[in-house]
Image (spheres, rainbow, N blue to C red):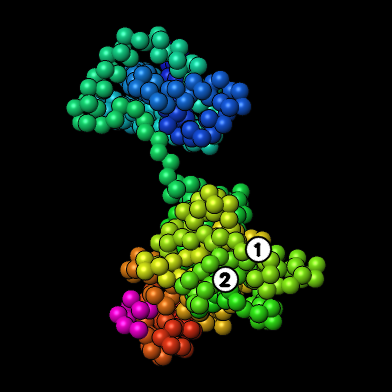
């Protein structure tokens, strides 16, 4: 075989090896979500790729048969093509035996380099750039080869299946998409500029609904504006002006005996129409939705949906009222500052300078972590607010000037009112790590 013929044969072998390498990487790297989208748009080839991914054994068997056969032929042809040429050149400066040894080594290196670059690295990097588009083009020829080599495919596939069964491993590809996978994809999209950072934060907030309890966003007991059932109209008007809310619980004697609630819209309509506001003179009293304080925000949303309500009373295990929550509270947690500044959070977390914050004790720990860029807090399942964090860390009711150090920050109690932590000064004690 002449040198030209050998080079042409090596070119064919490299092309064949590149084809199998591309077929292998595109099937492995193809995302099922993207393939399903392509199939739904009418690309039948994408559906065929999905079926192959479910049973990839025969496909990869053909790939490995092709790659190994080409590698063996490439070594034989390459050594026979280049060794005589290098041997003839090297014999001018060294003995025949030495020249043949070095010629073989040179031929080996050249063949390995050609196959490594053009038959392995280049096609695999090409396939990683757009795996789905290339996979749908490769699946047709590969299925023809699977049919052509069916006896070999059957033998090697069954042998591999037996090995998998012996090891107790699944025979089919298992694709389980978790919330962590979705969050990782959205974070990658935000870094790439495909997704706005605020939009990515909204998606992350949605997944937090399953882990955040109602206590993290509710209006706490001491901040609830409520009416007595026999309050005169003057008291109702003064309360509404001083504490404007969308709904007001109506109680009998104290806040733990809730009769229902009145909607602010109903009261405004009565004022505009000149009707009296007294609760015993026709103001609609709505039945209050009561939920336990251990529910997550996702469960509260479901309760709102089932009851067709957007306001709920939160009680603890002793049937004492601990707070109230509205649908708007939950949605504000999801949307963050995407639709505008969060006034409540601005009041709860005030940044004084680059290294210090003044934070309300009832601020949810998730908001504190986000503001301070802290990944984790100790004993996170034992509290929901910054005040709870300090109580757990100190193992007692904090007093003014008590402090806790954690993750490069000092949390110092600034004000306590009747055992309630009002204000906490947070100071960064270690310089912020550069990304």
Where is residue 424 shown, x and y percent of the image?
Answer: 47, 83
x 40%, y 14%: residue: 146
Figure quadrant of the N terminus: top left
Q: In terms of sequence position, does the residue under pointer 1 or pointer 2 come before the other?
A: 2
Residue bounds of the magenta highlight = 390-397
Q: Which residue is mark 2?
A: 250
* Residue at the spot 47% in from the left edge and 25% down from the top edge: 50
Q: Is residue 382 left or right of residue 341?
A: left
Q: Relative to the observer, which residue lies in front, 236 or 325? A: 236
Q: Residues within 10 Å of mark 1 (few under 14, many from 20)?
A: some
In percent of width and height, residue 64 lies at: 35, 22
Label 1 – label 2 distance at C-alpha: 11 Å
The residue nearer to you, when weighing 202 against 354, is 202
Vertical arrangement, residue 300 with respect to residue 144, above or below: below
The reply to whether the magenta stretch includes residue 185 is: no
Residue at screen point 68% across, 74% down: 278
Which residue reaches farthest right?
A: 273
Relative to 38, 50 lies left or right? left
Image x and y of residue 119, in percent: 44, 28
Secondary structure beneath dot 2 equals: strand
Query: How would you classify the magenta stretch by its main secondary structure?
Result: helix
Residue position for label 1 = 284
Helix, strand or loop status at disc 1: loop
Check the image and name the residue furthest to the bottom: 401
Q: Is residue 284 above or below residue 359?
A: above
Q: Which mark is residue 83?
A: none
Q: Nearer the viewer, residue 417 or 147?
A: 417
Q: Report the residue that reaches farthest toward the front.
A: 281
Q: Please indicate whether residue 115 sits to the left or right of residue 236 in the image.
A: left
């Amino acid at each position: 075989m002449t040198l030209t013929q050998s080079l042409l044969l090596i070119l064919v072998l490299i092309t064949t090896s590149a084809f199998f390498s591309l077929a292998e990487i595109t099937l492995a790297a193809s995302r099922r979500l993207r393939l399903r989208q392509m199939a739904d748009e009418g690309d039948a080839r994408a559906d065929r790729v999905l079926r192959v991914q479910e049973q990839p054994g025969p496909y990869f068997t053909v790939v490995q048969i092709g790659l190994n056969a080409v590698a063996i032929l490439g070594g034989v042809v390459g050594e026979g093509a280049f060794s005589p040429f290098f041997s003839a050149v090297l014999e001018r400066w060294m003995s025949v035996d030495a020249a043949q040894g070095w010629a073989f080594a040179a031929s080996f290196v050249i063949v390995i380099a050609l196959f490594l670059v053009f038959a392995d690295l280049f096609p695999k990097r090409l396939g990683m750039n757009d795996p789905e588009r290339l996979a749908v083009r490769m699946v047709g020829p590969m299925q023809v080869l699977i049919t052509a080599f069916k006896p070999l495919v059957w033998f090697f596939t069954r042998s591999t299946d037996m090995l998998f069964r012996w090891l107790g491993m699944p025979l089919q590809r298992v694709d389980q998409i978790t919330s962590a996978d979705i969050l990782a994809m959205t974070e990658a999209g935000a870094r790439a500029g495909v997704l706005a950072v605020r939009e990515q934060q909204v998606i992350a907030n949605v997944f937090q609904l399953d882990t955040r309890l109602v206590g993290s966003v509710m209006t706490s007991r001491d901040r609830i504006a409520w009416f007595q059932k026999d309050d005169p109209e003057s008291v109702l008007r003064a309360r509404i002006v001083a504490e404007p809310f969308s709904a007001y619980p109506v109680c009998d004697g104290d806040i733990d005996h809730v009769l229902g609630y009145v909607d602010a819209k109903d009261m405004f309509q009565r004022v505009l129409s000149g009707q009296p506001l007294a609760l015993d003179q026709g103001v609609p009293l709505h039945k209050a939705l009561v939920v336990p304080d251990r529910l997550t925000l996702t469960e509260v949303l479901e309760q709102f949906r089932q009851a067709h309500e957007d306001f709920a009373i939160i009680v603890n295990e002793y049937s004492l009222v601990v707070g109230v929550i509205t649908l708007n509270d939950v949605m504000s947690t999801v949307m963050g500052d995407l639709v505008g500044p969060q006034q409540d959070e601005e009041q709860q977390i005030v940044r004084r300078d680059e290294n210090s914050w003044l934070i309300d004790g009832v601020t949810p720990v998730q908001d504190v972590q986000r503001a301070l860029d802290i990944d984790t807090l100790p004993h996170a399942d034992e509290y929901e607010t910054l005040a709870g964090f300090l109580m757990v860390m100190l193992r007692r009711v904090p007093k003014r000037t008590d402090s806790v150090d954690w993750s490069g920050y000092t949390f110092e109690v600034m004000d306590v009112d009747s055992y309630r932590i009002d204000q906490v000064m947070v100071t960064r004690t270690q310089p912020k790590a550069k990304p």
